[in-house]
Amino acid sequence: MTQKILILNGPNLNLLGTRQPEVYGATTLAEIEAMCHARAQERGIAVTCVQSNHEGALVDQLHAARGVFAGVVLNAGAYTHTSVALMDAISSTMLPVVELHLSNIHAREAFRHRSFIAPVAVGQICGFGAAGYPLAIDALLAHLGADE
Ligand code: DQA
């Protein structure tokens, strides 16, 4: 059966391309999702891409991912820095999650240095812009043992 990965994007990431391009780059979310599908095809897996601006909807997506997806690439946007609910959802579902950020959150404002996702994630990729998404897919597959 083809392995499936969920690419889950949080608040304001639907505005990528026009949103602070000096910070997040000029690539749109649709282009990022196309990059994810291309990498999935190269790797012989399938990805489903979902974006929501709502914290509870992201929690619902994580719950629904159980038993359907082998793992999740999660850019939780600003909820990264605030959401105990997302942290708990990851712990509760026990899904392997790769935390992803376009920008290097550690080189930005102090409030972005804390991540509620990091303690429950497999690992974190940040600072590589849109290129981080295919990197995160590869990282998740490596974690899942696809490279062995
Ligand atoms: C972000 C970083 C967050 O701090 C910010 O709130 C975002 C995007 C990133 O991809 O760099 O919305 O997750």
Image (tube, grey):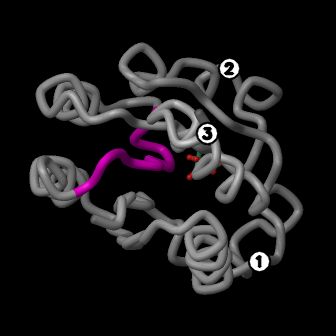
Disc 1 residue type (three-letter): Thr
Return the residue at label 3.
Answer: 147
The crowding category of the residue bearing disc 1, from other C-alpha atoms within 10 Å (few below 14, some 14 to 19, many at least 20), is some
The vertical placement of 120 against 139, above or below, is above
The vertical placement of 110 against 31, above or below, is above
Image depth: mark 3 or mark 2 in front: 3
Q: Under tag 1, what secondary structure? A: loop
The outermost residue toward the top is: 119
Upstream in sequence: badge 1 or badge 3: 1
Image depth: mark 1 or mark 3 in front: 3
Quarter of the rendering occupied by the N terminus: bottom left
Instruction: Check residue 70 for magenta coloring.
Output: yes
The outermost residue toward the right is: 22
Return the residue at label 1.
Answer: 27
The vertical placement of 34 against 71, above or below, is below
Ligand 1 within 8 A of label 1's CB?
A: no
| Rendered location of residue 93, percent (x, y) | 14, 33
Return the residue at label 2.
Answer: 110
* Residue 71, quarter of the rendered image: top left
Disc 3 residue type (three-letter): Asp
Q: Residue at x 56, y 69 (%)?
A: 40
Upstream in sequence: badge 3 or badge 2: 2
What is the spatial separation of the Cα atoms under label 2 and label 1, in whole angstroms?
26 Å
Which label sits on residue 71? none
What is the spatial separation of the Cα atoms under label 1 and label 3, in whole angstroms?
29 Å
User: Foreground: 42 or 47?
Assistant: 42
Disc 2 residue type (three-letter): Ala
Q: Residue at x 44, y 61 (%)?
A: 7
User: Foreground: 144 or 31?
Assistant: 144
Judged left or right of residue 50, residue 25 is: right
Q: Which contiguous range is marked in magenta?
A: 69-80
